[in-house]
Image: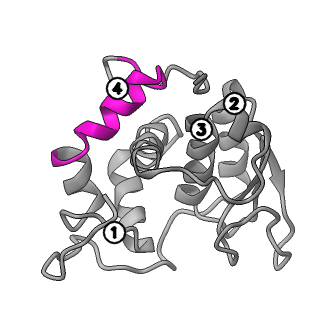
Amino acid sequence: MLAVSEAAQLETPADPTNVINCCPDRQQQLTELLKPYGIEINFVAENETIPGSFFGQREAGIINNQLYLRHDTPVHSALHESGHYICMDKQRRDNLDTDAEGDYDEENGVCYLQILLAAHLPNLDKETMMTDMDRWGYSFRLGSAKAWFEQDAEDAKDWLQKHQLIDQDEQPTWQLRVA
């Protein structure tokens, strides 16, 4: 997923200023969406440092089951960090502080899951999530999140199903990874 050939071109130009952010309504929607996973949203004031943010700046932060967001945090970042919490095993989840430390397969599963979860938020869908991922600068071997999701993510889907995080219809099971 993360390797990109030099010839690959993004279908959507990178523009991190043009993504959907966690405005108050979105934060409330995320609170409801993530409740079955036991993830709690913490609102961070504008211009305050986001606790647990691996990359800093506007990126979501996570410490244990606490997800930290500002109004300028991109929704894709909130779903990505939540995806790590959902996809990691219990031991890592119990000690989670900023760095999810996931392996290649988990990272792919997280990206796939964040796309699926986006479809469960009002006025958001898979296409918009994939466009935002491209605009932010996620890099995929096939040049875009959409191309990866549609043509090269079978291993990510299989990994999520193996860990019972999505069902055969590619819907979230609303359960955390056990082992």
For marks 2 and 4, give the one nearer the viewer: 2
Q: Is residue 115 magenta?
A: no
Q: What residue span does the magenta drawing correspond to?
A: 151-167
Amino acid type of the residue that numbered disc 2 sits on in the rendered structure: Lys
Q: In terms of depth relative to the viewer, which is nearer, 52 or 101? A: 101
Q: Are marks 2 and 4 in contact (CB under 8 Å)?
A: no
Q: Secondary structure at mark 4?
A: loop
Query: In the drawing, what numbered circle is on residue 139?
Result: 1
Amino acid type of the residue that numbered disc 1 sits on in the rendered structure: Ser
- The residue indicated by pointer 3 is 88
Query: In the drawing, what numbered circle is on residue 114?
Result: none
Going from the N terminus, do you reach mark 2 or mark 4 first?
A: 2
Amino acid type of the residue that numbered disc 4 sits on in the rendered structure: Glu
Q: Residues within 10 Å of mark 3 (few under 14, many from 20)?
A: many
Q: Residues within 10 Å of mark 4 (few under 14, many from 20)?
A: some
Q: In terms of depth relative to the viewer, which is nearer, 98 or 174? A: 98
Q: Residues within 10 Å of mark 1 (few under 14, many from 20)?
A: some
Vertical position of residue 96 compared to residue 1: above or below: above
Going from the N terminus, do you reach mark 3 or mark 1 first?
A: 3
- The residue indicated by pointer 2 is 90
Q: Is residue 136 left or right of residue 30?
A: left
- The residues bearing labels 2 and 1 have C-alpha atoms spaced at a distance of 28 Å
